[in-house]
Image: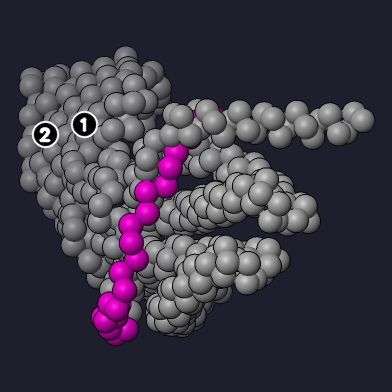
Amino acid sequence: MKMKKLITTALVSCSLLWCFGVAHAERLSLEQVIQKVVDHYPSIKTAAMQLEQARQENKRIESQLGWQLSAQAGVRHELSLIGSPVDTLQLGGGLSRLLESGDSMSLNAAVAHDDADTAFATLPNPSTSTSIDFNYRMPLQKGKDNPAISQGLISAQAGVQLSESQYLALYDQLAAQVVDLFYAAANTKARIDNSQQAIKRTLRLQSYIKSRADLGVSEEKDLLQVRAQLKAQQAEQQALKINWQQQQVSINRLTGLPWDQGFVPVLAKPEIGTNYIFDELFSESKQYSPELKTIRARLQLAESQIQLQRDNRKDQLDLVMFLGDRDLRGDITTGNYSENELVGGVSIEFGRSLDLSGRDAELYQAQLERGIALQDRVQVFENLHYNLASILTQISSGEQALKAYRQSMKAEQAKLKEAEHRYRDGRTDTDQLIQFENQLAAVELAVALQQLELARLQHALGLVTGRLWSNIQLPQFDTFVSEGQ
């Protein structure tokens, strides 16, 4: 009894929800539902921020080519070369910059003031020395053309493309989920409408049989048959309404609407007889495909790593040049001391790693990553090709099926109309009339469901080619930032 009471309560609650939903239903097309999901879904905001984060990597890498400022100051007390205590005050600063060519340059200046406890005739005390140096380093092998920066910028751009493709993939996943939910709900709604039409016909038949029974023409068994038919149809409709409410709750969860918000799916008529050109659609799908964009980004990242690792395996061979000025001033026992001299020089620096196994492994890993991406691209091409072919084949078959269903529906309507005339003349029985009613309801439902399936397939085609997003406003990162603030 307790279980029966719970079931009865659930049925009553769902009936109330059905009435509430119909009274407050909002008419929404598939594109409008997707727009609401895009505007609401939190994961999209997270993905947009990750995309903006990837875009900032370019600026971070480019900033390495800017000027770098350094400065230092200090005092110290220590022993001089001749063993006497000396107090030193030092000031220094410099500017350095890494160039796009891989060369680097720096300009440094320093001032030091020394004051020793013991004076010597040949050494100034106290003394002030200044130095100015300009240094230029030119890599001849490793680091030439600055692969760390150039490949870093390529990697950063590939990272942006990778985030963008993941962003699009998230959109597609949500849209695919919404398409399935929307058309599942539309399917249920079509079944409810079909059931309602069947109930109306059964009620009309029941009324007619009652009127004939009052005249003593119809038998009690005819009325019982119609009542049983009506009860079965009402039970089926009630089950459909429960399912309809569950589907609406699922859609409301994605859109962020109140759980009990009702909606009526607005369905565009499927396009019939469209001449789809496979090669054009396949080219369009390849251009849009988030998976292929992801693989292209992976290939760029792998190529960038290969170039970096090849550069790391090279020997270090740098040409280093410097030019400077030295100035020393101070007091000696015989008077003042002053000396100034221009200095400069050129040198070659060489370095080689004696164990390249680690760098060879890193290079091989990058080459393997490129190979994996190339193999994945072949698989994605194949999947895209067959997926598109499958959708187009189903659309073509679906159009033929819809044409056949419509013809069958016309035949069933004519058959039922003729049977109703015969029934009124007493030339057929109730069983056959109910059978014809059910056959007409079934084919009417088949027509409605086939139309839905064609519309769903055409939206699936729009999802593969990217056309689905042409009428949907995708949110921008700035919007998310302002919302977050």
Q: Residues within 10 Å of mark 2 (few under 14, many from 20)?
A: some
Range covered by the magenta-colored residues = 260-281
Q: What amino acid is at disc 2?
A: Asp
Q: Which scheme is used to colour this image of the protein? A: one colour
User: Percent position (x, y) of residue 299?
Assistant: 39, 71
Q: Is residue 428 left or right of residue 311?
A: right
Farthest top residue?
A: 117
Q: What amino acid is at disc 1?
A: Gly
The answer to which of marks 1 and 2 sits earlier in the sequence is 1
Compared to residue 308, the image places residue 122 above or below, namely above
* Count of marks, rendered view: 2
Residue hosting label 2: 327
In the rendered image, is residue 79 in sight?
Answer: yes
Residue hosting label 1: 93
User: Percent position (x, y) of residue 54?
Assistant: 35, 48
Q: Residue at x 36, y 32 (%)?
A: 81
Task: Measure the C-alpha gap from mark 1 to mark 2.
Answer: 17 Å
264 drawn magenta: yes
Identify the image quadrant of residue 148.
bottom left
Front residue (pair 316, 156) = 156
Q: Quadrant of the C terminus?
A: top left
Q: Is residue 105 left or right of residue 399?
A: left
Mark 1 secondary-structure assignment: strand
Front residue (pair 372, 33) = 33
